[in-house]
Image (tube, rainbow, N blue to C red):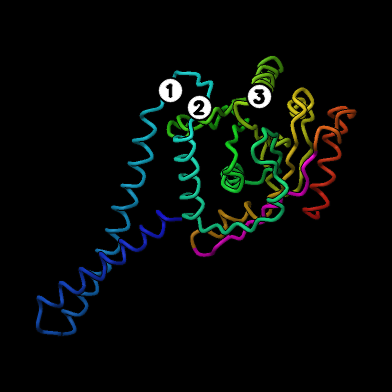
């Protein structure tokens, strides 16, 4: 938010400054001079915006250079997580997203948990990470998301885990790593149990295997829903998009300890369907 406001403010000041400078140095206010002055002011405004935009991205890229691409990090970093969340906030505001949150008081901050949400957009985990920023969350993500150099650096430093959906053995390794994160009090874990983005907005069938993370650790399951993220690409840049983020329930271990993962999955999916209304 701060970076976006600064970007707009600096570009506005550049435009005003250029316009004032031009008119102070041109005593004749002819129609042509007025047009030239306005043109110069607009050019300075756009130039200032682009220049600051580039500086912001140089900062994020520069920080990423301090992350070793081939190192497997075992512990989180408060600094890099803060920059990561800051980046998420910048992107969120750049795309003109307004988040309305309910149920945040239910989240057991200070305790490692499994964060569950529906999946409609590439912005979903960014928004969830922003809302739940008091707790660092390592997300389980598809391998394709690790191919983007800048994203890969921050994801690796944030202890994100890649999961091969078509390879049972590798997928199991990812789940076991996520279990160790929570058992060893390293970081909380975020999962989208649909396994992929819903292109229609409807809640897809869940992959119950991800609930093994809770079953094997006894951690709370924080159930969230996102509504509206699928509209961002349609609305940008002309309209703001309101995204509703709701923490609908937190399942404590006593509530699910005697249930198989399939039933845990079904109960959580039913709750989400009731909240989303579809």
- Start and end of the magenta stretch? 238-251
User: Magenta region's main secondary structure?
Assistant: strand
Determine if the magenta segment contains residue 161: no
The residue that mark 1 highlights is 69
* Closest to the observer, 247 or 234: 247
Between the residue at mark 1 and the residue at mark 2, the CA separation in whole angstroms equals 8 Å
Q: What is the quadrant of residue 59 in the picture? A: top left
Query: Residue 160, how many percent across, how many down?
Result: 57, 29
Residue 90 vs 145, above or below: the answer is below
- In the image: residue 85, left or right of residue 252: left
Report helix, strand or loop for mark 2. helix
**Does any portion of residue 166 appear in the rendered image?**
no
**Does any portion of residue 107 appear in the rendered image?**
yes
Marks 1 and 2, the one that precedes in the sequence = 1
Determine if the magenta segment contains residue 244: yes
Residue at image point 79% right, 26% down: 215
Between the residue at mark 3 and the residue at mark 2, the CA separation in whole angstroms equals 14 Å
* Closest to the observer, 151 or 212: 212
Q: Which mark is drawn over residue 178?
A: 3
Query: Residue 265, how many percent across, how many down?
Result: 82, 35
Report helix, strand or loop for mark 3. helix
The residue that mark 2 highlights is 156
Marks 3 and 2, the one that precedes in the sequence = 2
Are the two marked residues, 1 and 2, in contact with CB atoms closer than 8 angstroms?
yes
Q: What is the quadrant of residue 134 in the picture? A: top right
- In the image: residue 7, left or right of residue 212: left
Callout 3 environment at 10 Å: few (<14), some (14 to 19), or many (20+)?
Answer: many
> Disc 1 or disc 3, which is closer to the eye?
3
């Amino acid at each position: 938010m701060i970076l976006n406001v600064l970007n707009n403010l600096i570009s506005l000041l550049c435009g005003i400054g250029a316009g004032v400078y031009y008119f102070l140095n041109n005593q004749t206010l002819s129609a042509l001079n007025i047009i030239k002055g306005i043109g110069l002011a607009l050019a300075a405004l756009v130039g200032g915006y682009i220049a600051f935009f580039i500086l912001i991205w140089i900062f994020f890229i520069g920080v990423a250079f301090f992350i070793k691409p081939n190192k497997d990090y075992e512990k989180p970093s408060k600094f890099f997580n803060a920059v990561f969340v800051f980046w998420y906030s910048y992107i969120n505001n750049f795309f003109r997203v307004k988040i309305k949150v309910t149920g945040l008081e239910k989240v057991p901050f200070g305790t490692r948990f499994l964060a569950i949400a529906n999946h409609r957009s590439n912005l979903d985990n960014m928004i969830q990470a922003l809302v739940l920023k008091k707790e660092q969350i390592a997300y389980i993500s598809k391998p394709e998301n690790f191919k983007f150099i800048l994203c890969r650096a921050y994801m690796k430093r944030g202890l994100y885990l890649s999961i091969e959906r078509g390879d049972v053995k590798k997928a199991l390794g990812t789940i076991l790593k996520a279990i160790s994160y929570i058992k060893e009090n390293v970081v909380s874990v975020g999962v989208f149990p649909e396994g992929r983005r819903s292109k229609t907005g409807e809640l897809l069938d869940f992959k119950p295997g991800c609930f093994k993370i809770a079953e094997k650790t006894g951690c709370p399951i924080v159930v969230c829903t996102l509504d509206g993220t699928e509209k961002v690409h349609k609305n940008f840049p002309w309209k703001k998009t309101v995204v509703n983020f709701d923490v609908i329930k937190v399942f404590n271990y006593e509530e699910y300890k005697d249930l198989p993962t399939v039933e845990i999955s079904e109960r959580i999916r039913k709750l989400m369907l009731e909240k989303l209304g579809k």
